């Protein structure tokens, strides 16, 4: 964990140098078919998972794309222009229970249903999922014949709960007269928060989750218990900053602006991001709510359609290989083939264009991270995954893709090259606390981190 600390210190000392630093990408995987997202399993620094739109989860192990798919459900998931297999998230205790979750669609454009489903890792082979283990957690039919703006990024927060940002389910505008994203009786246009380790619907085979204590609208007569925040149009790509626990939302705009919103689960329950009263910082003509209004949470940043047309939300860099990039948010525009980094060191967003540095850039559909916090660009159109690093490349003596300065195992808490009793003692001493012993970055040191440490022993 020491390299992560050094990376942060390096970022503080190189604040000015970041503006002169050149980013580059190196090829990790090619020949993919419409890849949508990369993701990591907590505590596993050997594997990176890539989902393909047609319903296949590929595995990159130790930097090599495996010929056998981790999971193939292409008979379940029909690929369409704006739907298919959209997102993946791994349980915070994946090392012990092997549970992971897919967000996908079924049906044609005129009758699409979104699904949150659970699968488990094979007991015999950790590189293969059990295709027979499917369990439905949540399903929701689109409320119109348009079937767009579905969201696509299930996420586990530092509280261990699953956050599911959903779009308004329509095509242009808000097809319910501007009321769907604002209505507390509709799940569309909301951030949902659910507990997938409980079940409030024991007799329902298509709903298997628990409403967590603290959900702000739970128990209301005309509200849905799963709603945590509202006012979104199409939060297609979202991420959680592992250092702060904040949810970063790239919300695709309508006719005028694209926006970046930030939600803090500790303080932002009931937040209203404004759609369809407001698009970015621009008030609309919608009459069902007031704009401007102090009740609407303004985006952290937005840009006009003269800059880009379809934002791809990215991730905050928390890796080690590029110290001067630590704490900056990287994002892109899918349609205009551009990319940026956002520096918040001075308080206000300072945005720098990095399009040429991340080339080739056509169709960036995700900027995701691995277990070490390094970032990867997923190119939907050319079927590639590329890792973001710096020019010149940092020294890598053993050629494993991990710079010498970052060469440590996830569970090697004391950074002495071996996972042993000393690391175990540190985990036990920090039980229920957050810090270097929080190996799966869920906000606390607990049994899930212990499982990661024991799996990495020796």
Image: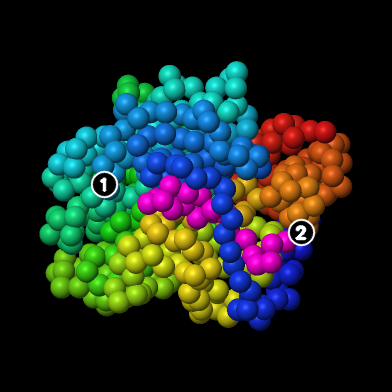
- Callout 1 crowding tier (Cα within 10 Å): few <14, some 14–19, many ≥20: few
Q: Which mark is residue 81?
A: 1
> Is residue 292 in view from this perspective?
yes
Q: Which mark is residue 395?
A: 2
Describe residue 127's horizontal placement relative to residue 69 as left or right. Answer: right
Please report the residue visible at 58 percent of the width from the left and 64 percent of the height from the top: 24
Any magenta on residue 310? no
Q: Which residues are magenta?
A: 376-394
Give the alpha-carbon distance from disc 2 to disc 1, as whole Å.
Answer: 41 Å
Q: Under tag 2, what secondary structure?
A: loop
Any magenta on residue 381? yes
The structure's colour scheme is: rainbow
User: What is the magenta segment's predominant secondary structure?
Assistant: strand
Describe residue 21's horizontal placement relative to residue 193 as left or right. Answer: right
> Is residue 298 in view from this perspective?
no
Question: Could you tell me residue 325's position as x and y percent?
Answer: 62, 68
């Amino acid at each position: 964990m020491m390299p992560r600390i050094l990376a942060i210190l390096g970022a503080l000392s190189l604040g000015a140098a970041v503006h002169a630093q050149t980013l580059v990408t190196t090829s990790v995987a090619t020949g993919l078919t419409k890849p949508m997202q990369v993701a990591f399993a907590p505590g596993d620094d050997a594997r990176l998972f890539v989902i393909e739109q047609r319903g296949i989860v590929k595995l990159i192990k130790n930097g090599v794309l495996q010929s056998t798919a981790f999971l193939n459900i292409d008979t379940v998931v029909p690929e369409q222009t704006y739907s298919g297999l959209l997102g993946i998230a791994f349980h915070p205790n994946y090392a012990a229970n092997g549970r992971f979750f897919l967000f996908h669609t079924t049906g044609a454009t005129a009758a699409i249903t979104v699904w949150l489903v659970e699968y488990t890792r094979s007991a015999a082979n950790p590189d293969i999922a059990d295709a027979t283990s499917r369990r439905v957690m949540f399903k929701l039919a689109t409320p119109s014949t348009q079937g767009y703006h579905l969201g696509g990024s299930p996420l586990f927060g530092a509280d261990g709960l699953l956050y599911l940002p959903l779009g308004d389910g329509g095509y242009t505008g808000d097809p319910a007269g501007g009321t769907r994203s604002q209505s507390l009786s509709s799940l569309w246009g909301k951030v949902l928060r659910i507990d997938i380790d409980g079940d409030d619907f024991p007799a329902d085979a298509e709903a298997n989750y628990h409403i967590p204590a603290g959900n702000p609208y739970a128990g209301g007569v005309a509200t849905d218990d799963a709603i945590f925040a509202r006012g979104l149009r199409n939060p297609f790509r979202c991420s959680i900053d592992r250092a702060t626990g904040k949810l970063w939302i790239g919300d695709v705009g309508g006719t005028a602006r694209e926006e970046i919103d930030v939600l803090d689960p500790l303080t932002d329950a009931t937040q209203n991001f404004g759609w369809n009263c407001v698009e970015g910082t621009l008030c609309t003509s919608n009459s069902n709510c007031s704009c401007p209004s102090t009740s609407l949470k303004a985006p952290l940043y937005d840009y006009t359609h003269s800059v880009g047309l379809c934002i791809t939300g990215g991730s905050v860099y928390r890796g080690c290989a590029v110290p001067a990039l630590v704490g900056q948010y990287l994002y892109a525009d899918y349609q205009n083939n551009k990319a940026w980094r956002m520096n918040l060191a001075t308080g206000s967003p300072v945005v720098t264009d990095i399009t040429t540095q991340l080339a080739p850039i056509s169709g960036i559909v995700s900027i995701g991270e691995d277990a070490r916090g390094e970032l990867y660009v997923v190119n939907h159109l050319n079927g590639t995954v590329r890792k973001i690093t710096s020019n010149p490349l940092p020294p890598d003596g053993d050629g494993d893709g991990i710079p010498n300065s970052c060469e440590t195992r996830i569970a090697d808490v004391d950074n002495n090259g071996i996972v042993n009793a000393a690391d175990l003692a540190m985990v036990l001493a920090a039980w229920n606390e957050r810090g270097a012993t929080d190996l799966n970055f869920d906000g606390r040191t607990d049994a899930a981190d212990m499982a990661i440490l024991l799996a990495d022993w020796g």
